[in-house]
Structure formats: C-alpha cells, structure tokens
Image (cartoon, rainbow, N blue to C red):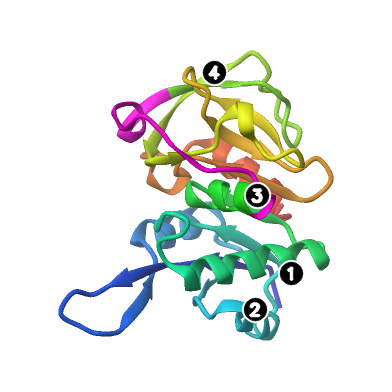
Amino acid sequence: MGKRIGLSMRVCNMGAYKEKRDCIAHDWYKFMQDSFPEVSWVPIPNLGSSVLDYIQLQEVSGLILTGGNDIGEEKIRDDTEMALIDFAIRNKLPVFGVCRGLQLIQHYYRGPIKPCDENIHVSTNHSVSFTHTIEGFTTIGGCRVVNSYHRQAVYVDSIAPSLMPWAITDDGCVEGLFHPDEKIVAVQWHPERTNPYVTDDQRLMAKVLNIR
C-alpha cells in the first residue's frame, strides 16, 4: 500500500436537516490530486476518541488538520483532532496543520487562542515575515504575501512553550509554527486556496509528511 494521508473534516450544520455532517472543501481534492498524485488521501470523520480505530484500519501514515470551525465551536471535532495529535505523537506520524489546524496544535500544547483584527485577517491577503529556517527551507529574514481567513489567532508573545514560530505578521500573529522535537508543522494560511499553488507550500508539505 502506498502513502496514505488523512485529512480532518469540519462539522457542518445543514439547516433544515437535524443531523450534523462532516464535510471538506472541494479545494482539498484538487490540491491533493495536483500536488501529490502519488498519494492516497483519506477523509477522517469526527468520531471523538474512537477515530483512532478508523485511522489504524485505514493505515494512515500522516495527518493534515484542515480549516473550519473555531476551537470550542464543535466539541466532537475538538475531541477528534486532539486524539489524532496524541496518536500521531505516540506513533511518530507527521502532522501538518492548516489555519484551524495551527490553532488546534497551539491548543493541544495548552497555549491560548485569541481574537485577531478582522480587517487584517478575514478574507484578505497580508505579509508574513520568516523568523526561522523550517524543514530545510531558508526563510530567515524573508517575507511573503499569504491569504488569510481567520478570526482567531496565536500570538507570538503567548505561543505555547513547546512550540516555535517561524512566520509572523506585523501585528504579532503566528502564521507558521513547528515543534522542535516532533514532526509537527503548521501554517495559518490556506495552501489549497492559492491560485496558482505556491511551490514552497507544496514542497514543505511533502517534506513534513514524508511524501517525497
């Protein structure tokens, strides 16, 4: 069996329908197909701690924690992804967080999540500055414009002690973080929403997730 990457899903409320449903943006299908055609990807349902049986059955070898749902909004998703991170650490699986995924990693390591300026961070683009070299990418002193779709943020002055920032905004939001001793890296922007895709995002994800 080839490489299998699990992608978490958001919880969707369907209005007139009583049941909640899991969903994932179509952008992710195209991004994974175009960026990593050699990889099988597996949508991960929100099952709480019982999700661990599912990912072992699916033989998942890495995780992408996707965006959507603020932390605290849907307990079943919070519980599912916290269990996923715990399992990944215990079993040496790589984790790549995107948007909410970055915040969830901060939450897992008991760091605070705070509101950010919506004029700067909601449905817009802004610059980030790189403060560390991450996974072999020389980014120190450089900068880049990224997309932004979040109302909550991790701030550099309150990042969890276990984590390190590698990209920050002018107003002090952490837009890239990593764990120095675990295979855990995250970005606040959405690689799957850029058009065209950014090669550095694809290369970084491939390296973190052991795809190439």
Amino acid at pointer 1: Phe
In the picture, the disc for residue 87 is 1
Q: Give whichever of discs 1 and 4 has the lower sequence position.
A: 1
| Disc 4: which residue | 143
* C-alpha separation, residue under disc 2 versus residue under disc 3: 20 Å
Looking at the image, the residue that sits furthest to the left is 16
Whether residue 140 is in magenta: the answer is no
Whether residues under marks 4 and 3 lie with C-beta atoms below 8 angstroms apart, the answer is no
**Mark 2: secondary structure:** helix
Identify the residue at horizontal 65%, vertical 78% (top origin): 55
- Residues 193 and 53: in front is 53
Whether residues under marks 2 and 1 lie with C-beta atoms below 8 angstroms apart, the answer is yes
Counting from the top left corner in percent of width and height, residue 80 is at 57, 71
Q: Residues within 10 Å of mark 4 (few under 14, many from 20)?
A: some
Looking at the image, the residue that sits furthest to the top is 141
**Mark 4: secondary structure:** strand
| Disc 3: which residue | 206
Above-or-below relation of 89 to 204: below
Amino acid at pointer 4: Cys
Whether residue 125 is in magenta: the answer is yes
**Mark 1: secondary structure:** helix
Q: Identify the image quadrant of residue 124.
A: top left
* C-alpha separation, residue under disc 3 versus residue under disc 1: 21 Å
| Disc 2: which residue | 55
- Mark 3, mark 1: which one is toward the viewer? 1
Q: What span is in magenta?
A: 108-126
The count of marks equals 4
Q: Give whichever of discs 2 and 1 has the lower sequence position.
A: 2
Counting from the top left corner in percent of width and height, residue 31 is at 45, 54
Identify the residue at horizontal 71%, vertical 78% (top origin): 1
Q: Residues within 10 Å of mark 1 (few under 14, many from 20)?
A: some
- Residues 112 and 138: in front is 112
